[in-house]
Image (tube, rainbow, N blue to C red):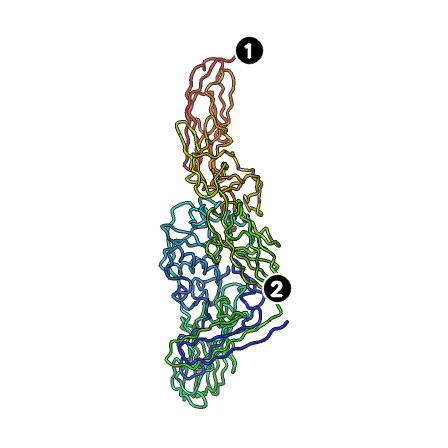
């Protein structure tokens, strides 16, 4: 292994100063860091060691900051938004850009208090949130950008929706949810997802680090189960600002490693960093004390004449998580400490070296400011150093990359004497994978495929790959998380290709751009390939699909229009199911149905009901007295198919009225005989929904299905109807029942739905056998 330590030192004398720092070697921390997803990210090596900003002058330096060009500036809400948003962005672009930023600078963990609901604190000190924290931190940014937000209402999860283009849209930066509607472009709302779980099932949940897994998206869909009216906002939380003020002898050290010191009411977070605030206090005068009584500064230190005290204040923009007090006191002087917001002073014990860790424990109120007091009679303070451990979020640190870095220093003082020191490592023993080429499809060529297939040539030194597909020419922004994947997390693990997990996720006649990069066995990411671009040759989604009901004739006809975009359809598939939010499937498939003891999947039959030829005004009768009762379903979808067998995506779910009796009822029966009819009606199975049962918060099962009850409203006493099964029995006696009889059946579904059918049944004499 060849690793060399490097250092850069600069004397800062102006309020704004730019430095060029060249970093050698082949590898840096950004190249060895996995893309950030839901869980904490992996990283195989870090080149950065530390950055020290030290006041070596005689005056306080106010509002100092160091930023690396090309990285977001996270000093306050204003600079964060300036880093995210570009001039001329519309509200939709702002909402998406903020969500994209938010999900890439945090992972799933929490402090257990409200600390990480403050966006600036979270980004700089912590770098992690749970869902209930993240729902606030991303809302803070949206609202600061002038966008309205609405409280999300999933089960056992917290989200926020953002308003633009006349509606609310779900952008979940905790679970990395960005669910597209059927147009493969519009971001769906929570209400749309709750109404049609297939939108979530064809998406990707929990970010780029999660495996491409159907069960995961089915489970994620089960959290969205509220169908009622929605209201409520989220009030902005926090007003923290990263203000760095350095008094003479004070220095701030940014660190990229951790020393096990953190704030939080639980186990240590899996990834964080520790920095240091160090102050060698000038004692020749009391100017830098917060207050002093009967104390004077001398060349020998501070001297108390009689009963005297001096108070120093420590303040930090980063959360304080430990420290030590190093002092040389002669005489009768005792140290005590008071945290900001507290009234009592705690006496500190120890001679010369006092550990402050126990006074700044993890499970306590977060501390950003405290005071130290030396009190007593006739004492002399000859030296004083105060060191405090800081918790820092690694992703927000001003890291240097291989190559030339432009580093900018700024402050708000009239004069300063500051020393800036960067320390890092360089290594050249690990190889960087070569740039990937051979991307197919490319050059705008059409790909005729229901599920797009992306392929590329093996990259030299690459063991794994990361691809991204979007609408922008540089493929910088993924169309959705479905199209931003690490290949080893997909069904194509170990291969140089990827196939979309669902059909119809891309639109015909639309230019898509995509690129790939490789990762070495050591975890080093290579450069991105040149973007490739292509179009999809496929039929467009059937337009304006609906179910026209003629209640007088009791028939239902599916109707739709051909899509002018895409290849011409030659046929249409009709899919139907009793599952709300079902996925169109031509073959039998597995589906998550509960997790009562463990995740339980069962095989479901194909829900393809029919294939019909295309025509200028396509329609298909699915309900009616003369229609095959097997076609009657409460929910339908339609898929277009072109000459090459390429399919569109399925339409939005088409819902039939429920309950609706679909069984033809007998107009004639014979006296003296029993006629039995199994009365069927359209009933919903419901969908997979999570709820709490006892201590379990995510108990998943099919819920909100129809609980059907059959009733005989009118009819002779020789007719019976089983209320549960719907078995209708007609047993007219041999004598006295001839003629017409009025019969009325009623069915309830337990959800407010009712259907009533009345008809006249003619009883004729029994047939006489000869």
**Depth order, front residue of 37/405:** 405
At a point 60% along the width and 54% down the height, the residue shown is 496
How busy is the neighbourhood of tag 1: few (under 14 within 10 Å), some, or many (20 plus)? few
Q: Nearer the viewer, residue 332 or 705?
A: 705
Disc 2 secondary structure class: loop
As helix, strand or loop, the secondary structure at mark 1 comes to loop
Percent from the top left, x then y, of residue 693?
A: 50, 48
In the rendered structure, the answer to whether residue 29 lies left or right of residue 744 reads right
Let me know if residue 152 appears in the view: yes
Q: Residue furthest right?
A: 1
Across and down, in percent, residue 710 comes to 46, 30
Q: CA distance from mark 2 to mark 1?
A: 89 Å
Crowdedness of circle 2 by 10 Å Cα count: few (<14), some, many (20+)?
A: some
Q: Quadrant of residue 667?
A: top left
Residue 582 in the image: above or below residue 97 = above
- Residue 637 location (% of width, % of height): 47, 39
**In the picture, which quadrant includes the N terminus?**
bottom right
Q: Earlier in the sequence, mark 2 or mark 1?
A: 2
Indicate whether 714 appears above or below 320: above
Give the x, y percent position of residue 261: 52, 70
Closer mark to the observer between disc 2 and disc 1:
2
Quadrant (top left, top right, bottom left, bottom right) of the C terminus = top right
The quarter holding residue 233 reads bottom left
Residue linked to disc 1: 769
Question: In this rendering, does residue 206 appear at all?
Answer: no
Judging by the rendered image, the residue that carries numbered circle 2 is 522
Identify the residue at the far bottom of this view. 299
Q: Nearer the viewer, residue 556 or 108?
A: 556
**In the figure, 603 relative to 167: above or below?**
above
Of the numbered discs in the image, which one, if any, rests on residue 276?
A: none
């Amino acid at each position: 292994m060849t690793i060399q330590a490097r250092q850069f030192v600069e004397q800062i004398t102006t309020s704004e100063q730019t430095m060029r720092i060249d970093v050698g070697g082949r590898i840096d921390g950004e190249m060895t860091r996995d893309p950030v997803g839901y869980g904490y990210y992996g990283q195989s090596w870090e080149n950065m060691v530390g950055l020290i900003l030290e006041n070596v002058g005689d005056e306080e330096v106010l509002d100092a900051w160091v930023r690396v060009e090309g990285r977001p500036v996270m000093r306050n809400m204003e600079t964060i938004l300036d880093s995210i948003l570009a001039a001329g962005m519309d509200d939709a672009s702002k909402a998406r850009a903020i969500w994209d930023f938010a999900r890439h600078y945090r992972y799933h963990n929490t402090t257990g208090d409200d600390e990480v609901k403050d966006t600036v604190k979270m980004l700089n000190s912590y770098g992690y949130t749970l869902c209930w924290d993240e729902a606030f931190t991303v809302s803070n940014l949206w609202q600061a950008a002038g966008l309205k937000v609405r409280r999300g209402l999933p089960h056992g999860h917290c989200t926020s929706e953002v308003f633009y283009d006349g509606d609310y849209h779900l952008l979940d930066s905790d679970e990395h949810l960005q669910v597209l509607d059927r147009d493969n472009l519009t971001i769906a709302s929570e209400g749309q997802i709750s109404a049609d779980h297939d939108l979530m099932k064809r998406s990707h949940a929990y970010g780029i680090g999660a495996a491409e897994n159907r069960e995961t998206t089915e489970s994620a869909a089960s959290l969205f189960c509220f169908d009622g009216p929605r209201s409520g906002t989220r009030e902005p939380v926090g007003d923290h600002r990263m203000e760095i003020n350095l008094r003479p002898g004070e220095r701030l050290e940014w660190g990229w490693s951790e020393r096990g010191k953190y704030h939080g009411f639980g186990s240590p977070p899996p990834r964080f960093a520790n920095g240091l605030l160090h102050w060698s206090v000038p004692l020749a005068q009391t100017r830098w004390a917060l207050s002093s009584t009967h104390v004077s500064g001398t060349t020998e230190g501070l001297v108390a004449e009689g009963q005297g005290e001096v108070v120093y204040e420590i303040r930090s923009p980063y959360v304080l998580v430990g420290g030590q007090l190093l002092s040389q006191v002669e005489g009768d002087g005792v140290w005590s400490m008071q945290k900001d917001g507290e009234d009592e002073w705690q006496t500190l014990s120890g001679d010369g070296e006092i550990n402050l860790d126990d006074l700044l424990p993890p499970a306590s109120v977060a501390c950003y400011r405290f005071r130290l007091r030396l009190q007593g009679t006739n004492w002399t303070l000859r030296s004083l150093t105060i060191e405090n451990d800081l918790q820092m979020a690694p992703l927000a640190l001003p890291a240097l990359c291989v190559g030339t870095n432009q580093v900018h220093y700024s402050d708000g003082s009239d004069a300063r004497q500051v020393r800036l020191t960067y320390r890092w490592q360089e290594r050249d023993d690990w190889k960087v994978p070569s740039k990937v080429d051979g991307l197919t499809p490319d050059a705008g060529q059409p790909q005729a495929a229901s599920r797009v297939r992306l392929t590329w040539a093996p990259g030299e030194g690459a063991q794994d790959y990361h691809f991204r597909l979007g609408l922008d020419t540089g493929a910088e922004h993924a169309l959705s998380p479905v199209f931003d994947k690490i290949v080893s997390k997909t069904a194509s693990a170990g291969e140089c290709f990827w196939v979309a997990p669902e059909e119809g996720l891309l639109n015909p006649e639309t230019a898509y751009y995509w690129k790939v990069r490789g990762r070495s066995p050591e975890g080093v990411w290579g450069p991105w390939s040149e973007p490739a671009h292509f179009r999809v040759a496929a039929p467009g989604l059937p337009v304006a699909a609906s179910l026209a009901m003629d209640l007088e004739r009791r028939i239902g006809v599916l109707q739709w229009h051909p899509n002018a975009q895409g290849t011409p359809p030659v046929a249409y598939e009709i899919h139907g199911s009793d599952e709300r939010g079902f996925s169109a499937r031509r073959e039998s498939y597995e589906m998550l149905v509960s997790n009562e003891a463990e995740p339980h999947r069962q095989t479901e039959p194909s829900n393809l009901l029919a294939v019909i030829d295309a025509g200028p005004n396509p329609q298909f009768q699915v309900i009616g007295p003369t229609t095959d009762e097997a076609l009657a379903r409460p929910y339908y979808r339609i898929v277009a198919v072109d000459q090459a067998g390429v399919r569109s995506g399925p339409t939005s779910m088409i819902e039939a009225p429920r309950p609706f009796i679909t069984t033809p009822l007998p107009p004639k029966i014979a006296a003296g005989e029993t006629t039995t009819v199994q009365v069927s009606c359209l009933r919903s199975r419901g969908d997979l929904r999570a709820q709490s049962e006892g201590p379990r918060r995510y108990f998943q099962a099919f819920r909100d299905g129809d609980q059907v009850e059959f009733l005989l409203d009118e009819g002779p006493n020789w007719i019976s109807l089983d209320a549960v099964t719907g078995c209708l029995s007609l047993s007219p006696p041999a004598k006295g029942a001839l003629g017409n009889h009025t019969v009325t059946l009623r069915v309830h579904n337990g959800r407010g739905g009712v259907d009533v059918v009345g008809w006249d049944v003619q009883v004729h004499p029994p047939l006489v056998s000869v």
